[in-house]
Image: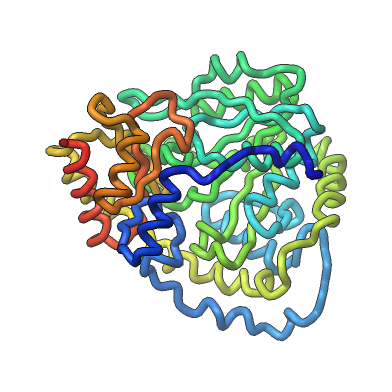
């Protein structure tokens, strides 16, 4: 016997079996789905030294986390020009846990969250584990870039809706929440008394945002807003497991929500003391860390743009993040057939568009993190495959 919430029936598929077989045979695969910054040859020096703080031997539980860690996170936002009181920050073990705590805070079983489509398929599982339903709203792309389908967002609100989730920049589209959409979402959520959950893990990695029309919802004073982020992307340290919630709650509701979130967080207390003590030290080196990653992202993005002129695919607009979306004509081979052939015959791994719930066939998602030499070779193989 086990919970029906775990009845997802996800058997091994042909794609995963091909990759497993190749790796067992010792074949080298070019992984253009790689999202782990610790495996792409980008240096992150001095990380382990900060874990040796003797203060880590003392257990000092607090539902919001150690003050020194929260102050360093507030300093991160201050450097972005945003004022966040450390008392409005809750430290978690990851952004996934941050989402989970907020779902527990805001929703009962049977309630609904509005989430973007396309987007990374994480919230479906997190919501299901708390008995909450996910309802999608579309992101639309045109010549002006990506934007939220505001009409569809409004139409999908029911009496069971509890929150709207924004990912800025989105994974995988790389699109930031723009001012027009931001104002519309705030108006809708205030009118319907909905919370806004904003995932900003990729916020620092601007790639092509020339007009600067993007900003955090931390200054949305009328809205009940919770921003989640973490060092997996901010510091390229996914293995250290530290995320956070920064709450922007109207003054008259602060006591209610602050005390309730304290209760939820105090039940878990899952962030480790060594990592919390190390966070201020790591935050001081974030510019160096991010610059190395940004240089890699921009170099591979430049290669993509150079290839696009003669390629059998079109790159969709990208403003930030670690990924690029390629659209191709799936007449000769479907999206699924293409990724299977790329893995089996060309030994290249890419994400299919359906993994992110794109609205129709004909999309590939590639990471901009891999080694540039590997990236170019992998993209050349993709180009030959799509050209037939």
Measured as percent of width and height from the top left, residue 117 is found at 51, 29
Q: Nearer the viewer, residue 30 or 45?
A: 30
Measured as percent of width and height from the top left, residue 248 is found at 70, 42
| The quarter of the displayed image where residue 382 is located | top left
Left or right of 256 on screen, residue 95:
left
Residue appearing at x 55%, y 39% in the figure: 121
On-image quarter of the C terminus: top left
**Count of all numbered marks drawn on residues in the image:** 0
Residue appearing at x 53%, y 76% in the figure: 47
On-image quarter of the N terminus: top right
Q: Is residue 283 above or below residue 157?
A: below
**Residue 36 in view of the camera:** yes
Q: Residue furthest left?
A: 310
Residue appearing at x 72%, y 69% in the figure: 272
Measured as percent of width and height from the top left, residue 245 is found at 68, 50
Q: Nearer the viewer, residue 329 or 265?
A: 329
Measured as percent of width and height from the top left, residue 135 is found at 62, 25
Q: Nearer the viewer, residue 144 or 221?
A: 144
Instruction: State the colouring used for the structure image.
Output: rainbow
Left or right of 306 on screen, residue 298:
right
Left or right of 205 on screen, residue 82:
right
**Residue 317 in view of the camera:** no
Residue appearing at x 71%, y 27% in the figure: 112
């Amino acid at each position: 016997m086990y919970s029906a919430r775990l009845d997802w029936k996800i058997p091994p598929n042909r794609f995963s079996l091909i990759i497993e077989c190749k790796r067992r045979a010792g074949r080298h695969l070019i992984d253009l789905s790689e999202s782990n910054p610790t495996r792409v040859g980008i240096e992150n020096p001095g990380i382990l030294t900060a874990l040796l703080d003797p203060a880590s031997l003392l257990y000092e539980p607090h539902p919001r986390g150690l003050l020194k860690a929260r102050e360093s996170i507030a300093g991160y936002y201050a450097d972005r020009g945003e004022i966040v009181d450390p008392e409005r920050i809750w430290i978690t073990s990851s952004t996934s846990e941050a989402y989970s705590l907020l779902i527990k805070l805001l929703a009962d079983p049977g309630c609904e969250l509005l989430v973007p489509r396309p987007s990374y398929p994480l919230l479906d599982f997190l919501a299901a584990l708390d008995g909450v339903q996910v309802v999608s709203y579309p992101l639309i792309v045109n010549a002006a870039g990506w934007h939220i389908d505001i009409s569809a967002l409004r139409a999908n609100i029911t009496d069971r809706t509890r929150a709207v989730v924004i990912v800025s920049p989105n994974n995988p589209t790389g699109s930031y929440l723009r001012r027009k959409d931001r104002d519309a979402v705030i108006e809708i959520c205030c009118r319907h008394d909905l919370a806004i959950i904003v995932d900003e893990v990729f916020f620092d990695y601007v790639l092509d945002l020339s007009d600067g029309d993007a900003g955090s919802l931390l200054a949305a004073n009328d809205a009940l807003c919770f921003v989640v982020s973490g060092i997996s992307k901010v510091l390229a340290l996914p293995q250290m497991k530290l995320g956070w919630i920064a709450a922007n709650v109207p003054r008259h509701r602060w006591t209610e929500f602050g005390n309730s979130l304290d209760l939820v967080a105090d039940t878990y207390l899952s962030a480790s003391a060594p990592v919390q003590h190390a966070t201020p030290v790591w935050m001081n080196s974030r510019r160096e860390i991010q610059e190395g990653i940004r240089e890699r992202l921009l170099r591979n993005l430049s290669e993509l743009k150079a290839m696009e002129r003669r390629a059998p695919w079109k790159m969709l607009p990208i403003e930030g993040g670690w990924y690029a979306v390629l659209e191709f004509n799936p007449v000769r081979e479907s999206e699924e057939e293409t990724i299977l052939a790329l893995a089996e015959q060309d030994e290249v791994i890419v994400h299919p568009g359906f993994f992110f719930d794109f609205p129709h066939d004909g999309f590939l998602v590639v990471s901009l993190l891999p080694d540039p030499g590997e990236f170019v070779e992998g993209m050349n193989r993709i180009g030959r495959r799509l050209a037939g």
